Image: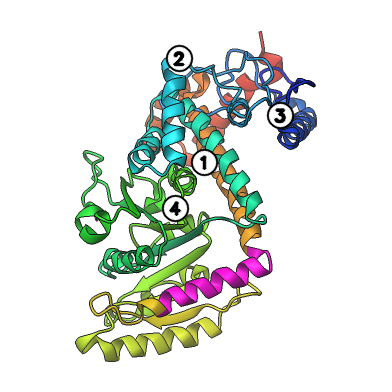
Amino acid sequence: MNRGYVTLTCNTPPSSGDEMPHMCHNMRRFGFSLHRHISSLPSSSTVPSGTRTCCLLQRVFPGSHACYRSTLPGPSCRHKRDVSTALGSHIQDPSGPEQRLLDRLYDGLIGGQRASLAESITLVETQHPRKKELAQLLLQRVLVYRREQESRNGGKPVAFRVGLSGPPGAGKSSFIEVVGKMLTARGHKVSVLAVDPSSCTTGGSLMGDKTRMTELSRDMSAFIRPSPASGTLGGVTRTTNEAIVLCEGAGYDIVLVETVGVGQSEFAVADMVDMFVLLIPPAGGDELQGIKRGIIERADLVVVTKSDGDLVVPARRIQAEYTSALKLLRRQSKSWNPKVVRTSSHTSEGIPEVWAKMESYRDAMLARGELQGRRRAQQKVWLWTLIQENALCHFQNHPSVREALPHLEERVTKGAISPGLAADLLLKAFSSSSSPSSSP
């Protein structure tokens, strides 16, 4: 095996009475396919010792130049918790206080305690290298718990993920509050992950959705988590996907993800939810021109909001326009045709019908297995998204790149060389010093 990579193994004591042989088998199979994949890599992909900062199954943290390697022995499958912790065996063993923290968060999380869920999401969102490692250990335990729940549910997801987006002023927060109150009254547990715009100067959140969802925030069957976008493209933070997992582990069967507004956020949120809902206000100008085709194509449901009072007539017109436009677009699913509905958060008119459409979508997608397939594809998308982010971090922190970057940046800004040539030179410096021949 190439130097610097981690092999996952699973040692099962033959006399243990509370083993999980199916989990052991899955981990052995994962370790074997991981080993087979790494062995098939070309020699040029081997990074020499001393410059390697992005090993497989490792996370690069901003501002850190160290490579976190595993020195731990193979994990044991004696207990469920041991299995989930073993999946993160490339991380240093938690100390006594750290293990007690993880146990407390995990027990509180699966017990449905909102305080534990909030603290767990804070741990996931942190930029501290060691806390990031602990967050991954917690996530692995929650993933094992969620997989067991899905297994008992016939392999079907136990939660329904809905992404909501739209232009500023579309009434997203008001819509979510009315829908959330209706769902909690019907016995559902609803979590709302709302990504707020961030200040470019301080990084702080400009608005808080809890101040705009006062009734829902006081509901004990609901959980609202506003998070600053922090400059992330589209406003969907990289930890939002992991926060969804934590919410599902805490027993929330409806997860609503609200994004900043129209733009790249639609494409980001559509890759982490089961259903994408686009909210648009009436009388906002030429909507079909302003909201581009690519965004409409991702929508599984279009909701025309504020359909009350003097806006009823414009809302009906917009509904008709979008209904006609959707007929011209290629279908994303064989099980579902996108619908256009009108609602009013002020009068609650159309709100039950919106949820009925969402349930119809979920049932149709589950019946043909499309929803499960969509989730599997999304996991692959997020895997490569994180790889790209980490690879960029690794490139920026590489000694040769850090040495050459200031001079090349200066030459680019003065117009002495083109940005393309500077990029090629940096990549050449990176690849030449990372080649096997340059290893000590």
Viewer-nearest of discs 3 and 2: 3
Which residue in the structure is indicated by mark 4?
252
Q: Identify which residue is drawn at 37% across, 71% down.
A: 279
Within 10 Å of disc 4 (Cα), the crowding (few <14, some 14-19, many 20+) is many
Q: Is mark 1 on a helix, strand or loop?
A: helix
| Quarter of the image where one finds residue 255 | bottom left
Do the numbered discs 3 and 2 sit on residues whose CB atoms are within 8 Å?
no
Residue 77, image x, y percentages:
68, 26
- Tell me which label, 1 or 4, sits earlier in the chain: 4
- Tell me which label, 4 or 3, sits earlier in the chain: 3
Q: Identify which residue is drawn at 46% across, 31% down.
A: 135
Within 10 Å of disc 2 (Cα), the crowding (few <14, some 14-19, many 20+) is few
| Quarter of the image where one finds residue 311 | bottom left
Measured along the vertical axis of the image, is residue 268 above or below residue 71? below
Q: Which of 403 and 328 is in front in this view?
A: 328
Which residue in the structure is indicated by mark 2?
96
Residue 407 visible at all: no
Q: Residue 19 carries which label?
A: 3
Q: Is mark 4 on a helix, strand or loop?
A: loop
- Tell me which label, 3 or 2, sits earlier in the chain: 3
Within 10 Å of disc 3 (Cα), the crowding (few <14, some 14-19, many 20+) is some
Do the numbered discs 4 and 3 sit on residues whose CB atoms are within 8 Å?
no
Q: What is the span of residues highlighted in magenta in the rendered image?
A: 353-370
Q: Is mark 3 on a helix, strand or loop?
A: loop
- Tell me which label, 2 or 4, sits earlier in the chain: 2
Residue 64, image x, y percentages:
44, 21
Q: Which mark is residue 420?
A: 1
Q: Viewed as shown, does residue 38 lie left or right of 252? A: right
